Amino acid sequence: MAAEQTKSGSTPQRRTLTVKPTLLGDKVFFGITSFTAYFSIALVGLVLVFLLIRAWPALQHEGINFLIGSTWDDSVQPMVMQIFPMLWGSILLALLGVLLAVPMAIALAYLIEFLAPKPIARVATLLVDLLAALPSVVIGLWGLFVFTPVAEGWSELLHKTLGWLPFFANETGNFSRSPFIAGWIVAVMIVPIITSVTREIFSQMDRDLINAAKALGGGMASTLTRVILPTASGGIVGGTLLGLGRALGETVAIFFVLNLSFDINWFDVSEARGGSIASMILSKLGEATDYEISGLMAAGVVLFVSTLIINFIAGYIVNRAQPWRK
Amino acid sequence: MAQVTQALPRPKQAPWQRRNLKNIVLITLASVLPSLLAIAITVAFSIDGAIGLVAVFLPIQILATVAVGQYLYKKRGRQDAVLMIFTIFFSTLVVVLLTSVLVSVFQRGAAMMRLSFISQNATYISSTTSLDYGGLGHAMLGSLAIVGFTTLVTVPLGVGVAIYLTESRSGSRGIVRSLIQSMSGLPSVVSGMFIYSALIVTGVSHQIGLTGSLALIPLMLPTVARVCEEALRLVPGDLRSAALGLGAPSYRMFLQVVLPAARTGIITAVLLGVARVIGETAPLLLTVNAAANTNLNIFDGPIETLPTFLFRNLSYGTDNSIQRAWGAALVVLFLVLIIFTLARTVGGDKKVAKPKKRK
Amino acid sequence: MNLSTATSHLRSEDINVWFGERHVLADVNLDFPSNQVTALIGPSGCGKSTFLRTLNRMHELIPSAGLAGSVLLDGQDIYGDGVNPVDVRIKIGMVFQKPNPFPTMSIKENILSGLKLSGRKFVNGDDIVETSLRRASIWNEVKDRLGEPAISLSGGQQQRLCIARSLAMEPEVLLMDEPCSALDPGSTRRIEETIEELSEAMTIVIVTHNMQQAQRVSHQTAFFLAEDGNPGTVVEFGSTDDVFNRPVDARTNDYVNGHFG
């Protein structure tokens, strides 16, 4: 008997396949899990909704000045609330933190993945994970009593040697509670996240590519700059953005090491001027009037929306840079 | 007669392991001499330590390494030398910072360690009371109660999300995953403000333990969901096919096959989630009232936790209260280390649980 | 040889399969009579494993999977309205390419896992365990270590355990997807013997790359081929003896004689 196939010629009708659970047990199972998933997402929306409701009076009254104005005055009725100095302070801190953390993170990731022998790499990984687990209030305590005296010295040194640069100018002679110090603290907080993303990208890289570069006579340095970094750049950028998001939201660790003053500190990193949105909220919310609470909630909305956007973009970039995750 | 070939004696070192003496001497000199020289100069001219490190040691070290690299391997050696120095410098910096945190907390915290500090609460204790009286027992119990309730709510939620992401075939999994991922970047103070505006300003609740617990949920959830999802993903698809092929409905397949295989991963997820929130301060400052007495009831009355105890004592600013803050830091650090070690031991190999093969 | 449809137990009618928009299998009509072993052979990527998975509705678990045609078990369409895929998979068991015992369960628990997973009630579990293990001819090797983890067994033993696990469900049809491809020759021989014994009680469909194996174990053979981006089709179907020794199609002749694939 040969092939007894009936060639129908026309395109056969596709059948609908079961994609939805049919059994009661499965319906309940997937119902519950979908509920938890949607509830968790709704939580993000709820946070925004509740902050917005509370923030509305202040936002409505101040309008765009809330973001770009620089006055915070509770001696008038209704009080004036404009957060630009704090907003810029947060951005400055985040930029400083990232600037300091990225070299440390890349160096560590490179050391762990390509340079160090296994046991050292393992210890280094452990240390980075441990650093990530340290509560920010403990870092804040350390920052205030142990790190600040040391960093004041660094700051003064920078002022003496590089004081002609506008960044290190200092008129007051006081080097404490400055963005420079808080930037270091932020860097300590975000090094682990940038390191772990970078390390993950490094570890999944095609070793043949690296060997090929070496086979062509490239040294470690040229392999790093011409092969490893370009290939991993997406992941590093994503990891850095994640760090940036963390840095914007960091509260307790910098609360004690950063001065809070309502005048814009564009880039005098060693001067104790400026502040950050998060530490402003923490310091004012306790004894705020109803209307002031509204302004602080609006500040919270700004913080939340900006970190959400940054994290969303970062997540997108990191996922794209890690196709093996899918 | 068959010719017998004598095996050549095997060289002691493979060719690529051979180092010639000149290389070894030069590299050793380049790694040791600069630091000795730098120390000598710094001491001789009594230069400040930080300046010595940056302005004396680094230039000499870079110069020496680059010179040796250039001499041995030309341009390649020069570049590699610079790379080496920077990698080691920045890595050491991180290690030094971390060590400084650990050592200072252990040193200054250890001075506070005494039975009364662990076992007593802070009733009738002011910021100037002798260190021999009062402690953070109430804060430890409060943390236990608040974080315990958070865990109780968050773990089912997080595991549910992880199941949704791995087991369901819903088309919206991608967006759910992205949103959960970005939720992990939610600033903790915002989470506190959420509960503050939703429950406290509106008069629904006072600042009690429960509001604190609720404020910690959005912070713990992403960690539990992500680690759990990874654990479920590590269970081989083979096992799922096998179970479905035997006629199992999805829920039985999950409960009887996937869940047991992912058990350790899920425990790790819970531990990491607890580690994530145990030291959270800002949300609790906004949502929980301070207490000096012991209170285990999260549904009524003010309640203290370890991180807020630390924060408040730090804020009082007296010598004694700062000393108490260091003590609290040591206790928090100790707890974090324990949870951290547990998570490492339980989920160490990141593989599906496999019983040992019997010999 | 006359394979009358009247006695056929399982039957596929005009099966077409898509993954997304890619048409991977076209117009497959095959009869699988009771107590016969049917071998599905063909080069990699010809759709034979995919076809096997349509026979017990494992196919639809792959996202983007599409299907046309029907699969009849005793004349009843297993894709019909109101037919529960779970019931289909209970009647039509499956053994996979790689041995996949449940690692968290003991040998005994593995055998009973199907009954528990499908929510069936049973009384004398020990009897079921013994019977199933005997039918998969592995009883003597494991009878003293039923409580041990299943993955303490060797690869060949694990695969026979998986067969026993399917047998505990008392399926009417057993589908086997290259069950010996990961095993040594000794284990392969034992499993082939098992297949022969089992065929007295059930219908067996086996996908295999090994043409000697197809000749040794099967009564009838279907040769699948997918040419140059076209969907896979059945080029030749008939008694194993005919397909291997008197192939009608030149391509079948080339394949069974090892000229390609």
Image (cartoon, coloured by chain):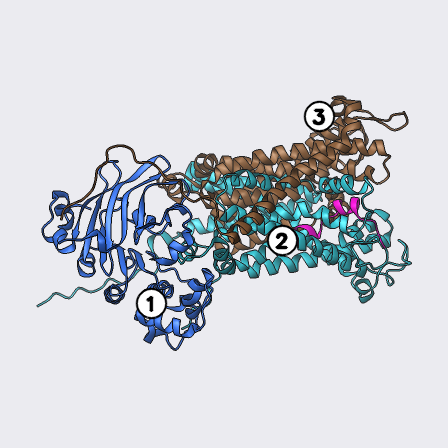
Chain colours: A brown, B cyan, C blue
Asked if the residues shown at circle 3 and circle 2 are in contact, with their CB atoms under 8 angstroms apart, the answer is: no
On the image, the x and y values in percent for residue B282 come to 75, 44
Count the marks: how many?
Answer: 3
Of helix, strand and loop, which one carries label 3? Answer: helix
Q: Residue A267, relative to residue B136: is it above or below?
A: above
On the image, the x and y values in percent for residue A203 come to 47, 46
Q: CA distance from mark 1 to mark 2?
A: 39 Å
Q: Is residue C5 left or right of residue B19?
A: left
Magenta residues, start to end: B270-291
Chain letter of disc 2 in the image: B
Q: Is residue B205 left or right of residue B268?
A: right
Q: CA distance from mark 1 to mark 3?
A: 76 Å
Q: Is residue A16 left or right of residue B188?
A: left
Asked if the residues shown at circle 1 and circle 2 are in contact, with their CB atoms under 8 angstroms apart, the answer is: no
Q: Which residue bears the numbered disc 1? A: C157
Label 3 packing within 10 angstroms: few (<14), some (14-19), many (20+): few
Q: Residue B167, relative to residue B71: is it above or below?
A: below
Amino acid carrying label 1: it is: Gln
Amino acid carrying label 2: it is: Val
Q: Which residue bears the numbered disc 3? A: A166
Q: Nearer the viewer, residue A95 or B342?
A: B342
Looking at the image, is mark 1 or mark 3 nearer the viewer? 1
- At a point 56% along the width and 55% down the height, the residue shown is A123
Q: Nearer the viewer, residue B252 or A93?
A: B252
Q: Which residue bears the numbered disc 2? A: B155
Chain letter of disc 3 in the image: A
Q: Nearer the viewer, residue A48 or C221?
A: C221
Of helix, strand and loop, which one carries label 1? Answer: helix
Chain letter of disc 1 in the image: C
Could you confirm whether marks 1 and 2 are on the same chain?
Answer: no
Of helix, strand and loop, which one carries label 2? Answer: helix
Magenta run includes residue A180: no
